[in-house]
Amino acid sequence: MTIETIEGGHATTPQGFYAGAVCAGMYASGPKAGGFDLGILYSDRDCTSGGVLTQNMVRSAPVYVNERRFPAGNIRGVITNSGNANAPFGEAGIAEAAEMAGLGARKAGAPDEQFAVCSTGVTGVLIPMEKIRAGVPQINATRDGGPDFATAIMTTDTVSKQVAVAVKDGDRVLYTVGGCCKGSGMIHPNMATMLAYVTTDANVERSFMRTVVREVADSTFNMVTVDGDTSCSDTLLAMANGASGVEVIEAGTPAAAQFKAALLDVCTQLSRKLARDGEGASHLVTVSVTGAQDEATARNVAKTVALSSLVKTAVAGNDPNWGRILVAAGRSGSPVEPTRTSVSLQGEVLFDRGKVLPFDEYALHELMKQEEVVIAIDLGSGSASATAWGCDLTTEYVHINADYRT
Amino acid sequence: MTIETIEGGHATTPQGFYAGAVCAGMYASGPKAGGFDLGILYSDRDCTSGGVLTQNMVRSAPVYVNERRFPAGNIRGVITNSGNANAPFGEAGIAEAAEMAGLGARKAGAPDEQFAVCSTGVTGVLIPMEKIRAGVPQINATRDGGPDFATAIMTTDTVSKQVAVAVKDGDRVLYTVGGCCKGSGMIHPNMATMLAYVTTDANVERSFMRTVVREVADSTFNMVTVDGDTSCSDTLLAMANGASGVEVIEAGTPAAAQFKAALLDVCTQLSRKLARDGEGASHLVTVSVTGAQDEATARNVAKTVALSSLVKTAVAGNDPNWGRILVAAGRSGSPVEPTRTSVSLQGEVLFDRGKVLPFDEYALHELMKQEEVVIAIDLGSGSASATAWGCDLTTEYVHINADYRT
């Protein structure tokens, strides 16, 4: 069996999924680029689902609604707006989030409790429900509405982020997995990155679905960092509707391993898109850690290096400043022994188990101008590994966030 | 008894301390602003001392020398260069650091093991010892050399940072406490901030000195954050030489409480200067947390908010974006319950135990243009408190660190 990326694939590539979007006028300053600010994505039949929510102690109102519904593992759709996070941070907003989910459910012909709701945008401002109420009836959800939906959930994102893969047996497509997500600031998921939705027409047993989504989130979305700030709205939702007609996929089978690989592929592609489109980013930064004594160490070191402001600014300047990489690894709190550790940048080894190697600084500076900068760290003390994705820190990030409201 | 700041005070304000500096040519690109790049600070007699060193797993060579000497609590001087951190990260550099300490000790007429050594600047490059060897004999250490020494330890700092206070009984000065420090990037001390030296002519019992320095570091230098990157060289060294002639200060006495208050005053003043001069900073940001269930919670919340890129960029834009403050508090991992929490900015309460309060956005925007922005968070769940100091995140920070080497 093989996994192939589908050119132009998106969240409604899998059979039985529908999506649509409108401009409901959620942005006070006028329609945002692309126009859409309210969207819906749903399956035309029951689903098994898995989902994870922000670990932030301060949460937006939709999170309170979703946390009550996700455990049942039967979510089949989601309604989402951009321009307002519905995060007034008190008791306020929760009734509005529930009402909004209900509007989505009726639109999709689904029971209320099988619908999720997400909002993203400014915090601390009550959501204008009259615009949501007026907007929902105007949405025309179709089988090819995935791209419009992916646009509707964008905030400071510069591109929409979507992908689909086909799982094939020879030439025959068994099922497909699609998805979309949005960033692009307040990104340091301690669950998932702000909003990410994955759809599949595979037929997946419910408890396996819940488990596999969490596992995949830990090695994909939870390994992305843009600025170290965990959002109050982070949500990953994956829905499987079985519309492909394949047999039910149960835990512990070869089909389960195959499905996990496809899910991992989709979530990795979305995670990379997210990091690459981090606010103000000019580079995708991939930090690959090997030789760790355990996976927790590998993940912690990878994420700490990806988050380091000094590493990120060095990448912005195409500066092969490997010393900052090593020092950031050292402050991770995980065991890092310089005399066992090696550091390479764009494939060139610069520090080898305690020794500084000579290198052509100008040539490497030029090589760092590529869109993706790859930092590889071998800790020399085990066989565990992990990858984190981040981006560089540019003056544009500061401009975006210093001028966001005023 | 009272504590008074001495106008123009510095590290050699306390009796019996000497300092001096030269330009040894440590910067390949030519002398840095101010000229000095190698300095020495020492007492003319024995000291009791306390010190704390970086917790980074990756450490510069001088840290390896100091960690062997600090436990004895008898350090009476330090030699320091800027322009090179002596951090080649292997076995290399340690012999050089020891040699450098020895050069300082002989200059000061002190035993080798009573001398400390620090280096700050670029990492990953061997230190040019011939310049140190040539420079030390040219240093002329005097009783008023504190300011020159404070200049010699600067790297990207824009101002030298020094202070002294007098502890008085009525009009009579009992003793003085002075100090200096340098920042200004890679500042998120997990001990102290890069380099800080405190001197006093008080007579302090050795084991109390060790203890009190650590306690004061935890609530001052360890509560400063510029960019979340912990340096490999962080060092705080405090030396007490008894030259004032006051009686020995023992733990548990009123004099000990007084000495701790003076030390806290000096370290707080230095910490604030450090944060205010954070790379690219245009504001000092003071985050004060009250009502926490315990001190660890208060510290963690204060430091997390001070570190938040989104809070820091909002301050750069004079944007009263209290939602980001609350969300940053929420991701600290400590218990933060929005319905109990209040947030104020420049003295104005914006969020009160779950309720958003109306405020004049323009007026507060104007008020945030002051040099110091004060964020106050009341967690409403206890009586512990803590203060953290940071700075805003500006495009200048990115310029400084993207262009540091290339």
Image (spheres, coloured by chain):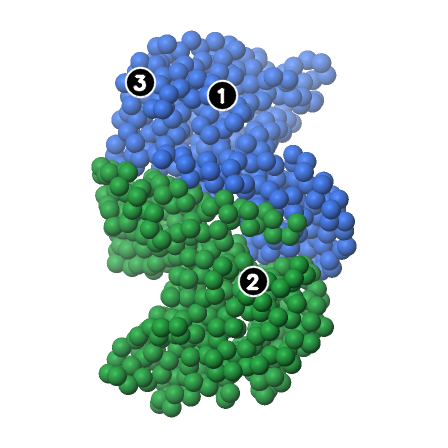
Chain colours: A green, B blue
Do we see residue A289 in this rendering?
yes
Q: Which mark is residue B131?
A: 3
Closer to the camera in the image, A128 or A142: A142
Residue at 32 percent across and 18 percent down: it is: B132
Q: Nearer the viewer, mark 2 or mark 3?
A: 2
Q: Secondary structure at mark 1?
A: helix
Residue A127: which quarter of the image? bottom right
Q: Amino acid at mark 2?
A: Ala
Q: Secondary structure at mark 3?
A: helix
Q: Is residue B94 above or below residue A390?
A: above
Q: Residues within 10 Å of mark 1 (few under 14, many from 20)?
A: many
Q: Is residue B222 above or below residue A246?
A: above
Q: Which residue is mark 1?
A: B150
Q: Is residue A347 above or below residue A37?
A: above
Q: Circle 1 marks a residue in which chain?
A: B
Q: Amino acid at mark 3?
A: Lys
Residue A323: which quarter of the image? top left
Same chain for the residues at labels 2 and 3, yes or no? no
- How far, Cα to Cα, is label 1 from label 2? 52 Å
- How far, Cα to Cα, is label 1 from label 3? 20 Å
